Amino acid sequence: NNNPNQRLRIAIQKSGRLSKESQALLKSCGMKINLREQRLIVHSENMPVDLLRVRDDDIPGLVMDGVVDLGIIGENVLEEECMLRVSQHQDTNFKLLKRLDFGHCRFSLAVADEDEYTGPQSLANKRIATSYPGILKRFLDEKGVEFSTCMLNGSVEVAPRAGLADAICDLVSTGATLEANGLKEVEVIYRSQAVLIQSDKKLNSENQAFLDKLLMRMQGMMQAKESKYIMMHAPKSKLEAVVALLPGSERPTILSLAGDDDKVAIHMVSTENLFWETMEELSALGASSILVMPIEKMLG
Ligand code: ATP
Ligand code: MG
């Protein structure tokens, strides 16, 4: 159906930390999108989908207001919007469909390296720079700590040095930015990753069926990411011990080896990334030619 009002609308971040992986996820589900165009709305060439590319801050509101059907957004931004809307007595309706396992970060309090920190009370009556004042306020209110905020939408980490604030509360993934700015992380107050959310507005049956299919495909992509295809040669006598080291849902395939009656080839999908430690244990059991291969897609 080509009626624009009946196509499924998905909001994703236009450019930033979530945009690449949001696009890659949709593409991996078979969606053809021409992203060279810098337009706000991009029509998929092969699916009844329009992508809306916006600032990430706008995504939760677009979903809650039913302007778009779906959105891919960091939980921290979603949470912040919820808190803002609750305080303004606005609707916060949406469904969380899926955690997407990318865009992982923590929202943490940090103070100057030389500052003493013994707990949230150390921040009493201090000024804290942040981009997400709602989540910060909820945390410090629960601890009964009075503070003031300095709202910054960027460069939060330079605020203490610039004399704008005594501490910061910001998103951290490796901590390198904090370190480079002479700050230390003292408290993790929220953990976030990218999520797929849906508006409460009912979809027509075609779009619902299409969404169901999309979700199945996403599930398949995520399952594949967590799984590995493993092949090895192992002594027949150690079969049970070998299989016990490899968590998997299906039984392994056992193949005989030409000219060797003591060993067999084992092929299986393991639901866990295989670490060197496990490979070394397999090797100690007498396994050889241990190969671990990535899986691109999985169904069923
Ligand atoms: P926009 O221009 O769309 O408003 P932005 O500057 O607000 O972008 P980004 O820096 O692109 O946002 O981050 C988007 C999201 O990526 C964050 O809200 C967070 O959920 C996630 N994220 C993951 N790792 C980090 C990190 N190290 N620092 C900041 N955000 C991170
Ligand atoms: Mg933003």
Image (spheres, rainbow, N blue to C red):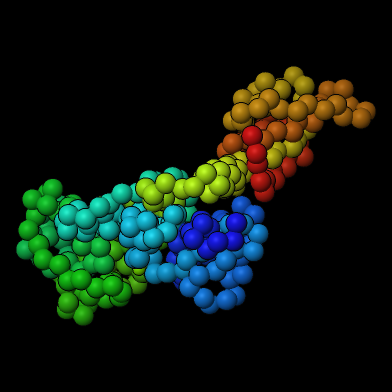
x and y, in percent, of residue 68 in the image:
42, 59
x and y percent of residue 54 in the render? Answer: 42, 69
Q: Position of residue 156 (x, y in %)?
A: 27, 72
Residue drawn at x 20%, y 71% is 151
Q: Is residue 190 above or below residue 155?
A: above
Taking depth in this image into account, of 146 and 84 the one nearest to the observer is 84
Up the image or down, 219 lies above or below 124; here it is above
**Relative to residue 8, is residue 233 depicted above or below?**
above
| Residue in the foreground of this view, choosing between 259 and 104 | 104
Tell me where residue 279 sits by quadrant: top right
Front residue of this view, candidates 84 and 104? 84
242 horizontally vs 37: left or right:
right
> If the picture is divided into quarters, which one holds ligand 2?
bottom left
> Furthest residue to the bottom?
162
Q: Residue at x 33, y 55 (%)?
A: 64
Judge left or right: residue 59 versus residue 203: left
Give the camera-side residue of 35 and 213.
213
Q: Is residue 111 left or right of residue 42?
A: left
